[in-house]
Image: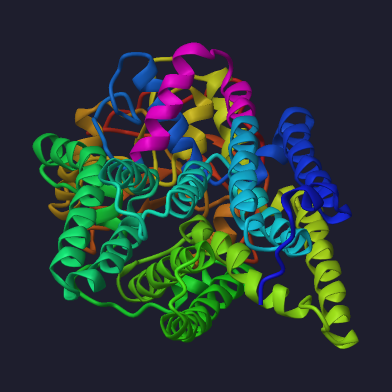
Amino acid sequence: MTSLQPEQSRRKSPATLLIVILMAAALCYLVVSAVSAGFLRVISVVPDDASYFLEVAQNIAAGEGSSFDGIHRTNGLQPLWTYALAGLFTVVKGTPEFLLRVVLVIQALLLTLAGVVVLRVQSKFYEARVGVVACLLFILLVQIPGTTGMESAFLVLSLSVLLGLGVGWRVFDEHRPRREFVFGLALGAAMLSRLDAVFLGAAICVACLPGIRAGSRARRIALVRLAMIALGASVIVAPYLAHNLLVFGHPVPISGVLKSSFPHAEFTPHVLAHLGPLKAGAAVAAVAAAVVYLVWFARLRRAGRRSGSTDGETLYHSALAVMAASILVHFPYSLLFMKWTEAWYFTSYGLFLTLAVGPLVAWLLSPGSSLVRRWVYRVGVTAIFLCGLLAVADRATRPLDACWHVVSYQAAVWARENTDETDVFSMANAGHFGFFSERRVVNLDGLVGTFDFQNVLRERRLNAFLSDRDVDYLVEHTFSDREDNDVLVVGGYGAITLPFRSLRYEVWADEVPVREEDEIFRSSPYYERGRSTVLIIWRLRHHGDVRGASPPPGVFSR
C-alpha cells in the first residue's frame, strides 16, 4: 500500500524537486500578486469579512480596544488571528491598502510553511510521487483560497503543527504527559484560530476513550492522556471563553451566536448553494472522502490488530481518521444549525483531501501496478495542475463590475477623501467600507456589534439608536433583492425605507427612511446576483434635521 524509500533517495528524486518547484511557484505567485497587482484586483478576491479583522486589529493596536466602529466593544471575530494582526499593526504602519498587501504576503508565507510541514510528515510514509499529488491539492484547495485575509492561514498552520506533533511524537502510542500537554496547547491554538475546530477537539478526545476500556494500566494511561490534552487546550481556550462571559455576557462571540440556530435545527440546503457549485462540490467530495477513509481505516485497524502492528504509519492514518470524524460532525452541523456558510468555513476539508489522497495514489503506484493505474495517476496529476491554473486565471480575470467588494472599496475611498474624519457612517456588510474609509462605521447586521444592539433591533429602536450616536450617513451596497431595484439604479424613487433584521431574534427592526435628495454618493452600476444594482450613501435626517442638504464635492453623478 505504501511506497517507502530511503530518505536520501527521496531527496534526489525528480518528484521531490518538482514538489519544491511547485511550492516555490505558488508562493511567488501569491506574493507577487499581493504586492504588484492593481488594488481593485486584490480587493476582488478578499472577502468583506477580512476587513472586520483588519479594522478591529487596527483599533486594538491604536489602544482603542476590541471595537469595529470605535464606539462599541465587540468580540465578533476569531480571536487568534485578530490579536496576531493587532500585534503586527503595532509595528507596521501605513495606508489601509498597504496593510492589506502586507497581510496577504504574510498569509502566503504561513500557508507555505504549513504546506512544508504537511508534506514533510507525509513523506515519512509515502514516496515523492504521492507528494506531488498532495502538493498540487494543497496549492489548489488550501494555499490559493486561504490567502484572502481571513483566519484560514492560522488555522491551517495550527492543524499542520497538530499533525506533526501527533505523528512525530507518537502522542497516542507513547505515553509522555509533557508532550501530551503541549499537543493540547496546539489543539487550543487551532480552536482559537477558528472556533468550530472544537469538533476536532471532540474527535481527539473520543480517540482517547478506547484505552479506558482496557486493563488498569492502559486505563490509567488513557485517562492521563485525555486529561493532559484537555488541560493543554483549556489553558489556551478557557481564558478567552471566560473573558467573553464576563465582558459580553456570553461565552460564544456575537458573530457565532448570530450565525447559528443551535439548538434549534433548521435544515437550510441553501447554505451550500451560497458557496457556488465548485466550492460546494469540493466540500461534498471531502465529506464523501471522510466516509470512505473511516471505513478503510477501520479495516486497516482490524488487520493491524491481527498482526500486532502499531507502526508510525498506523498513527498517521489514525490522525487522518480523527480529522475525518470531525468533518462528519461539522458538516451536518453546518447544514442543520448554520444560517449561512462561507468558503473559508471548510478550509480544513481541503487539507484533509490533501492528506487522504495518499493511500489511493500509493495504490496506483504500487509495485507491479498496471499500465492503466499509472496512466490514471498521470491524468490525475495533469487534471489537478490544470485546475490550479484555472484558479489562478479566475483570480486574475474575474470581472470587476460584478464584485461588490470592489464597489464597497471605491465608496470607502470616496468617503475617505470627501467627508470629515469625525463623521459616522452605518452599514450592513461594512468590512471593506469601514477599514478603507478610515471612518467610524456602525455595523447594522451586528456581526461585529454587541448583544445589546440585537435588543435595539428587536425592540424597533434602530432610528433612535442612530440618532443617539449621531450617525451621519447610511450606506447600502445592493438592492438586488428589492422589487424597486431598477428604479433605484436609474433614479427617480423619491423616498424609500430600508429594512434591517435582528439575526439573533429573527425579527425586523423599524425601517430607516431615506430620501433621494439626501444622496451624497452613488456608485456606477455593477452586477450582483445577476442584476444591475448600485451602492448608495445617504445623509440621515434625525428628528426632522435636514443637515447637509448639499452633498460634499466629488459625488459620483448618475
Report whether residue 147 is seen.
Answer: no
Left or right of 556 in this view: 308 = left
Residue 88 on the magenta segment: yes
Image quadrant holding the C terminus, namely: top right
Q: Is residue 53 above or below residue 508?
A: above
Question: Residue 75's image quarter?
Answer: top left
Q: Nearer the viewer, residue 254 or 206?
A: 206
Residue 345 x, y percent position in the rendering = 46, 58
What residue sits 14% from the left and 49% below the top?
455
Counting every numbered tag in the picture gives 0
Left or right of 117 in this view: 69 = left
What residue sits 17% from the left and 64% below the top?
217
Left or right of 286 in this view: 328 = left
Q: Is residue 57 above or below residue 49?
A: above
What residue sits 62% from the left and 25% below the top?
102
Residue 515 x, y percent position in the rendering = 42, 43
Q: Is most of the magenta stretch helix, strand or loop? A: helix
Residue 53 x, y percent position in the rendering = 43, 35
Specify how the rendered protein is coloured: rainbow
Image quadrant holding the N terminus, namely: bottom right
Report whether residue 300 is seen.
Answer: yes
Residue 553 x, y percent position in the rendering = 59, 20
Left or right of 6 in this view: 369 = right
Q: Nearer the viewer, residue 278 or 346?
A: 346
The magenta region covers: 79-103
Residue 116 on the magenta segment: no
